[in-house]
């Protein structure tokens, strides 16, 4: 078994197996959260606890979707033959919420050919390598997916929050094959959206479109809660579309007028790959807006 990436501290750090709900092991209460969690951010590892501990470097909100399959599996008998991996732990991923100096954030649309979360709008991100600092992993993923390298001294960063992620995202889609804790990092650049956009060179194997969201549209997207029956009230002055950039097969790029309604879709009960914003990204956008308001 590979070295544990996500550890829970209960006396001594212990790894979390693939089938275990991280939120459940931390003893989160009823409701949707988020739940404040103490974190030790180490090279290639994340140590979590529901109480302060020596070496904890942050206290971050932790959340999972209402339909988290690992939570559901904790509360229902497993069907015969429905086995989950026993030789894997929970993986660690990092995602960069990149904010320009004019207060917009970058989202990318994952290609349809990816095995995990195809056709979803997300911040740049991915796996943290063993012995890699978490910020370094986030900046590496930002560069690999968008071609952006941020000059030293022209940005600062703060950890935003933690998301327990599964794919497939619902049990009704099938048993989960992937289990991650995603650490969202807010990276605030001193450069404008225009300056950053001019340097972007998306990786077509992973990304087929990108856009910059301002606070108004981001607030509407963040308010469309997945797993809730009644949508929240949306502002009447919401623009009918947002402007994005889409990659062409010949390597070029073209403007894409994306209906705002596409970004307001929620995770369906049955498997499909319709374009939408991921549930974890909505959580990250809510945290970003809270940070802006401070």
Image (cartoon, rainbow, N blue to C red):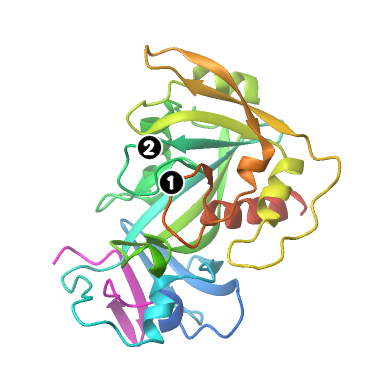
Q: Residue 108's mark?
A: none
Rendered location of residue 107, percent (x, y): 54, 37
Q: Which residue is mark 1?
A: 273
Dividing the picture into quadrants, the one containing residue 260 is top right
Cα–Cα gap, marks 2 and 1: 8 Å
* Element at label 2: loop
> Is the residue 77 above or below the residue 217 in the image?
below
Q: Is residue 129 left or right of residue 24?
A: left
Label 1: how many Cα within 10 Å (few below 14, some 14–19, many 20+) = few
- On the image, the x and y values in percent for residue 240 come to 75, 34
Farthest residue in the right direction? 236
294 sits to left or right of 258: right
Q: Do the residues bearing badges 2 and 1 touch, measured as CB atoms within 8 Å?
A: yes
The total of numbered circles placed on residues is: 2
Task: Give percent across and percent down for residue 206.
Answer: 36, 34
Please, is residue 226 above or below residue 207 in the view? below
Decide which of 136, 220 is in the foreground and name it: 220
Q: Is residue 5 magenta?
A: yes
Given residues 230 and 46, the one toward you in this image is 230
Q: Which residue is mark 2?
A: 112
Could you say whether the residue bearing mark 1 is in a helix, strand or loop? loop
Which residues fall within the magenta stretch?
1-21
Q: Quadrant of the C terminus?
A: bottom right
Q: Is residue 69 above or below residue 269?
A: below
């Amino acid at each position: 078994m590979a070295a544990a990436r996500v550890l829970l501290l209960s006396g001594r750090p212990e790894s979390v197996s693939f089938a275990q709900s991280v939120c459940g092991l931390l003893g989160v209460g009823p409701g949707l959260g988020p739940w404040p969690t103490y974190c030790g951010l180490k090279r290639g590892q994340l140590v979590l606890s529901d109480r302060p501990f020596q070496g904890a470097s942050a206290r971050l909100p932790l959340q999972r979707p209402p339909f988290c399959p690992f939570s559901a599996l904790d509360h229902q008998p497993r069907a015969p033959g429905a086995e989950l991996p026993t030789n894997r732990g929970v993986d660690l991923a990092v995602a960069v919420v990149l904010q320009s100096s004019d207060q917009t954030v970058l989202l990318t649309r994952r290609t349809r050919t990816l095995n995990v979360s195809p056709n979803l709008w997300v911040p740049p991100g991915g796996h943290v390598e063993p012995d890699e600092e978490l910020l370094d992993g986030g900046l590496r993923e930002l560069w690999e997916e968008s071609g952006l390298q941020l000059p030293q001294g022209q940005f600062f960063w703060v950890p935003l929050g933690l998301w327990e992620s599964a794919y497939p995202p619902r049990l009704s889609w099938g048993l989960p094959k992937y289990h991650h804790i995603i650490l969202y990092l807010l990276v605030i650049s001193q450069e404008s959206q225009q300056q950053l956009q001019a340097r972007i060179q998306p990786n077509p194997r992973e990304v087929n479109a990108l856009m910059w969201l301002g606070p108004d549209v981001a607030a509407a997207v963040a308010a469309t809660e997945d797993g809730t029956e009644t949508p929240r009230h949306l502002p009447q002055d919401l623009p009918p579309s947002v402007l994005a950039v889409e990659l062409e097969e010949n390597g070029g790029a073209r403007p894409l007028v994306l209906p705002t309604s596409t970004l307001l879709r929620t995770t369906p009960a049955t498997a499909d790959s319709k374009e939408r914003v991921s549930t974890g990204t909505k959580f990250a956008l809510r945290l970003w807006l809270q940070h802006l308001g401070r």
